[in-house]
Amino acid sequence: MKICIDGKNITTKQLTEWKRKRVKKVLKVLNYKSADIRNLNNISKKLVEIKMSYSYQEMYKKLKTKLELSKMIMGTGAYLSGNKRRFARTEIYLDGITAKKAAKGIEDLMLNQSAKNTRVNLAACPDHYVLRPLGEKNVEVIETTGNSPLPVQFFIVFDDETGLQTPRDHSYEYESTGVARLKDGTIIGGVRHQIKDTKTGIKVKLSVEFPSITPTSIIQSHQMHLACEFSYWLQWIKNQKDMDPEAMNKNFIS
C-alpha cells in the first residue's frame, strides 16, 4: 500500500505517530487512563473494546456537551464561509484488489449495520465514535475531524451533491458522493471518493470538503484521518474471501 498527501508519500512511521497522538486524545475524551500507550496495537484494540461497551445512547450522552458546542462552531463556520470550501485530499494505492471489490466493501461498511461492521468502523480510526446507518442512503457520524478539539455529529446523505465542489473524474469507474449536514440541516461540507483499477490493484482518490474558514491544521490532520481510516478499511476488505462484488452500481453508495 502507498499513501500520498499533497504529492508526498506518507510513511508507516508518520501514520503510526499520528494515530498514537489521536489514541491518547480519545482516551482522554472517554476518561480512560492507560500506561500502555507505548504499545499502539494493544491500546488501539483496548480503545475499540471501550467504545464497543457503550450503547449509542450512552456514547451520545457522554459526548453531548461537546457535540452541542461543536454544532454551534460548525454552524457558524458554515455561515461565515458561504459556499466557499477547503479540501482534505488523500490518495491510496493498494495492490491485489479490484475497484469493484473495494467499492462494494466500503458500501457494505457504511450502509449495513452489524456488530462486525461496527467493530471494523470503530477500529479504522481512533477518532470514530459512531458510524450508524439511518435508512437507505443516510449515515450518522460522530467523530473528530482532523485535530479539532471537539468531536462533531453530522449526517451524510449519499448520492446528494448539493453544493459539492470536488469535480467528478471520469477516469475513476466508481465513486461515492455525499453531503454532510448538522442535525438542523445546515450543510457543513461533503465528500467525493473515487476508485479505479490499476495494473496491479486500485487507486483511491479521497476528498472531503470543509467550510473555507476551517484552519489549515485541521485540514492537514484530516488528510491523515483519511489515510488512517481508508487504509484500514481497504486492507480489511482485501482480506475478506466471501465478499461478492457483483450486485452493485457504478455509484458504490447507491
Image: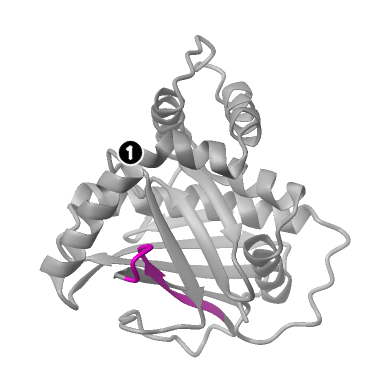
> Would you say residue 139 sits in the magenta stretch?
no
Q: Kindly identify the amino acid type of the residue bearing the numbered disc 1.
A: Thr
> In front here: 108 or 66?
66
For the image, the number of numbered tags is 1
Residue under the image location 30 percent in, 42 percent down: 147
Which residue bears the numbered disc 1?
A: 65
Name the outermost residue toward the right. 242
In the picture shown, does residue 246 fall above or below 125?
A: below
Specify the quadrant of the image occupied by residue 80: bottom left
Front-most of residues 80 and 209: 80
Q: What colour scheme has been applied to the protein in the rendered image?
A: one colour
In the displayed image of the protein, which residue is found farthest to the bottom?
170
Could you tell whether 52 is left or right of 186 in the image? right
State whether residue 213 is above or below residue 152: below
Residue situated furthest top in the rendering: 35
Q: In which quarter of the image is residue 160?
A: bottom left
| Magenta region, residue range | 175-185
